[in-house]
Amino acid sequence: MALDKYEVHEHDVIVIGAGGAGLRAAIEASAQGAKTALICKSLLGKAHTVMAEGGIAAALGNVWPEDNWKVHFRDTMRGGKLLNNWRMAQLHAQEAPDRVKELEAWGALFDRTPDGRILQRDFGGHRYARLAHVGDRTGLEMIRTLQQHAVHKGIDVFMECTITRLLKDGDRIAGAFGYWRESGRFVIFKAKAVVLATGGIGKIWKFTSNSWEYTGDGVTLALDGGAHLIDMECYQFHPTGMVWPPSVRGILVTEGVRGDGGTLKNALGERFMFKYVPEFFRAETADTEEEADRWYTDKKNNRRTPDLLPRDEVARAINTEVKAGRGSPHGGVFLDIASRRDAKYIQRRLPSMYHQFKELADVDITKESMEVGPTAHYMNGGVRVDADTAVTAVPGLFAAGEIAGGLHGANRLGGNSLSDLLVFGRRAGLYAAEYAKNFKGTLTVDAGQVEALARACLDPFERTGGENPYAIHQDLQECMQSLVGIIRTEGELKKALEEVATLRERCRRIKIDGNRQYNPAWHLALDLHSLLTVSHAVTLAALERMESRGGHTRDDYPKTDPELGKVNLVVRKVGTELTVGREPLLQMPPELRQLLEGDK
Amino acid sequence: MTVLDALVEIQREQDPTLAFRYSCRVGMCGSCAVVINGRERWACRTLLASLKTEAVTVRPLYHFPLIRDLVVDMAPFAAKMKAAGAVFVAKEGEEAFAPIGRNVKERRQIDGAIECIGCGACLSACTMVGWNEQYAGPAALNRAFTLMADSRDGAGAERWPLLLSEDALVRCHGQANCTEVCPMELSPTDSILKLRRKSIFQLVRSAHRLDTSGATVVA
Ligand SMILES: Cc1cc2nc3c(=O)[nH]c(=O)nc-3n(C[C@H](O)[C@H](O)[C@H](O)COP(=O)(O)OP(=O)(O)OC[C@H]3O[C@@H](n4cnc5c(N)ncnc54)[C@H](O)[C@@H]3O)c2cc1C
Ligand code: SF4
């Protein structure tokens, strides 16, 4: 058969992506007895998850015994402006504590309360201190623990291997097609079930906290394979990224700076956040600087500082200040902790931030203000999945982690991603293994299709056109940054759609020099299909949601629209076209609805 | 401008095929370690200006097989971890969650050595790794140290023979090149010394056990 000339592997379950979600899925599938492969495009251990600093949200009740899954559920739904899939929010809140404890049983070591239990820290939007953490390197500990556990379990790992297409047999999943980055040779994975755990899409914007891997591959694999996306318009911009020097623009400045006393100021020295407290949060937010400052030491008798409003609110406020001409020299605002806390305290509480600014920007944050501005951070939406099983619309295809939509609704709370990875990573692995076990038919991979995929991948070497993939990526980032950023309007969104189409045309003229061996220009040329597809999907959905909600803000529709609050926007690929449609939210059972209404 | 920024710019403007690894850009993932002006450093956190030289030379890490340009095969790194048994194995029968306090000696020892980002700089700088491919090297022994200090770990008995083999603890000559280059400011040298100290007790114990069971002692 024609597949003979390719390297072919056969498994029950393959997991694409080796961040927290992928590792946890692979561990579970393998524990269920499925022959499991784990595939990732960077080296094992370098996935985005390693960057997570703040912590993992779980209602352990260690610091506040009042905390339980019901409160966590309520906070998550409220934070998501009720667009969330309620069942995911429920499972997430219920199962997160077990997943955290399990990590410890596998060797992780979280920070401790004085009596030896897992310590929890405060974060925006969580009623109680809820984030289990390891200093400011929670992601590193999580990745190491999961990775060692996975390798120990004998899972087959394929590193620096990029998947470019899912393979199907009729309606069902049959495997995946990709290439080795090192040699450029193609490889075929035959599998009964596939779990997508490839993370997000942040590299479509110019200013982003995300790593180079976030080109939206998994989202595109899913769309091309027949799955659906939801809530793509609700992308999260984190309010505080670095803005200077240009090369580090977008790198995250943790919410912890404000948690530990830092405050936002404009060029006039005003603490401007007091001007931007929305009605929804007014009752629980301080309205004088004195009260806000007292809150840090006396949380019982004072209300929270507006500097710690949810991320969407703060990001919009900064944007408005800059547009009004009250920004910092390099187009951000000031984040000042230097004048508010002593140098020792800052260095002890925020060691990575201290080093980050010292080394990258030559700014001593114990002496000077930081310049910060919004940065693309997290995909709240993503591939639509069934809450309990993580299966997508395609039989045999599962998705978990940042790539999956639903849990976070229109806006994610900090810390709710790491817990998401574990809860739904495990579920995806479990149900993928079960699906594989119950599948009794045979699956065939179409040799003709593989041949065509391989040829398409090699096309850029053969062309005569003069386009450079880096230039196209840069132009896409400029386009998305200026036209599909935090604040959107119909005219700009339509213009973005046109530009994305033009960039797609330019892609046809990309010419790659050199050979296939570890050739980054070629890798990017192939990634561009994903980058353009997800840009298109985000823009389409943003046009359709004619209101402002959570991570999605329309200048031409600044209010929320109750009718649109009843639907998710769903993006599909029909033929070669992307379409967007409205679909009603899942109905929440009354006993859960009551939890939300209990106290506003 | 950092060395990584410079590499990215060269890739964009001059040589689109220039191969190097990076991921997070903020010193968390450990992908971008290379040899800069003769010393192992992370490209993302090294400012060109801080090097104070007109021209800056960049080459791939030593002691790893070269793939292309600045990209090396990191497989030896994982292999060494395995050779030193540097994997957590929960103690049998112990309650799944055993508390380790927050300011106990055990915790302080582990915390001081745990933040390895797997960059490989220490292996590149280690002359003993250069001499002997089999040597487990600083990163793996450092990790083994944190596990040996961890009361929840149950694999000590299997790990000791690996650590006491001729390609592990005894190989280190204490030159501390690893400690000098570690971007996370860990001291694998210190971890190795502490493990050696522990191993003396261990040797005495196992020699005793072997003697009484009548087996021969392997030096
Ligand atoms: C700076 C920063 C700090 C953060 N801090 C926190 C925090 O404190 N708490 C919190 O809850 N969340 C935090 N987040 C968010 C959180 O870290 C991420 O959402 C989460 O780690 C994503 O995990 P994942 O498993 O879905 O994917 P990732 O960890 O991103 O893994 C994706 C995997 O997919 C692979 N992959 C991608 N494309 C392909 C392909 N085509 N073929 C093969 N493999 C592919 C990659 O190689 C990688 O292994 C933070 C994010 C950032 C950027
Ligand atoms: S010990 Fe230090 S130098 Fe060695 S791999 Fe770990 S972080 Fe890198």
Image (cartoon, rainbow, N blue to C red):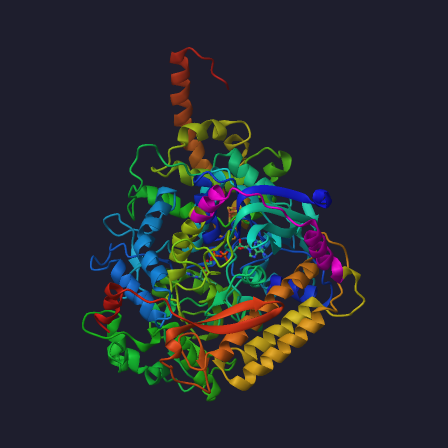
Describe residue A238's horizontal placement relative to residue A596 as left or right.
right
- Is residue A456 located in the magenta-colored stretch of the structure? yes
Figure quadrant of the C terminus of chain A: bottom left
Can I make out residue A425 in this image?
yes
Q: Is B18 on the left-hand or right-hand side of A592?
A: right
In the image, A349 versus A476, the foreground residue is: A476
Magenta portion: prevailing SS class: helix
Front position in the image: A502 or A110: A502
Q: Residue furthest left?
A: A301
**Residue A174, placed above or below residue A126:** above
Percent x, y of residue A478: 60, 76
Magenta region: A431-460
Instruction: Spot the residue most to the right.
Output: A464
Q: Is residue B190 placed above or below A229 in the rendered structure? A: above
**Quadrant location of the N terminus of chain A?**
top right
**Residue at image point 47% right, 16% down:** B217
Is residue A33 part of the magenta span, yes or no? no
- Residue located 72% across and 59% down the image: A456
In the image shown, does B29 or A60 lie closer to the viewer? A60
